[in-house]
Amino acid sequence: MQNSTEPKPKVFLYPKLSCLVRGAVYEVYKALGPFHKENVYSKALELELKRRKIPFIREKILDVVYKRKKVGVYRPDFLIDDKIILEIKAVPVLPKIDEKQLYYYLAGTKYRLGFLINFGAKNGVYIHRRVVG
């Protein structure tokens, strides 16, 4: 029996799929490095996801819901296997507003896991993983 003062064990959401996506992201970064535009990384990632047979949809329109009412739409760069939202950036420094924006996109849709990926960081690709709910 677990003691009530012990923290609950964390459950990693979609571990296999997350690992596959991260592997595809690192493969793209390894091949291209940090100095391209966002659309170059998006196209390369699309090819890598296809090569690895990871199901995805590019720029699927998602409804943003507030109190069960549609209040807007959101179009993520990738929706992976109808489970993970992926946003791609290619900037030297990722503003905090982009991380907050991912949180709000997740909070306003049915999705619980998102990755904000910055290919433009000078110290390597940056993957911010965010879970809501």
Image (cartoon, rainbow, N blue to C red):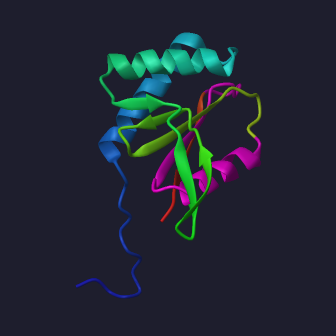
Q: Between 60 and 23, which is closer to the camera in this rendering?
A: 60
Residue 113 in magenta stretch:
yes
> Position of 74 compared to 18: left or right?
right
**Rendering quarter of residue 47:** top left
Magenta highlight range: 95-124
Query: What residue is drawn where x is 35% and y is 68%?
Result: 9
Q: Between 74 and 77, which is closer to the camera in this rendering?
A: 74
Residue 130 position, x and y percent, is 54, 52
Residue 112 position, x and y percent, is 46, 56
Q: Between 115 and 65, which is closer to the camera in this rendering?
A: 65
Residue 64 in magenta stretch:
no
Residue 64 position, x and y percent, is 58, 54
Relative to 28, say whether 125 is above or below.
below
Query: What residue is drawn where x is 52% and y is 45%?
Result: 62
Relative to 69, say whether 27 is above or below.
above
**Rendering quarter of residue 39:** top right
Query: What residue is drawn where x is 70% and y is 44%?
Result: 98
Tally of marks: 0
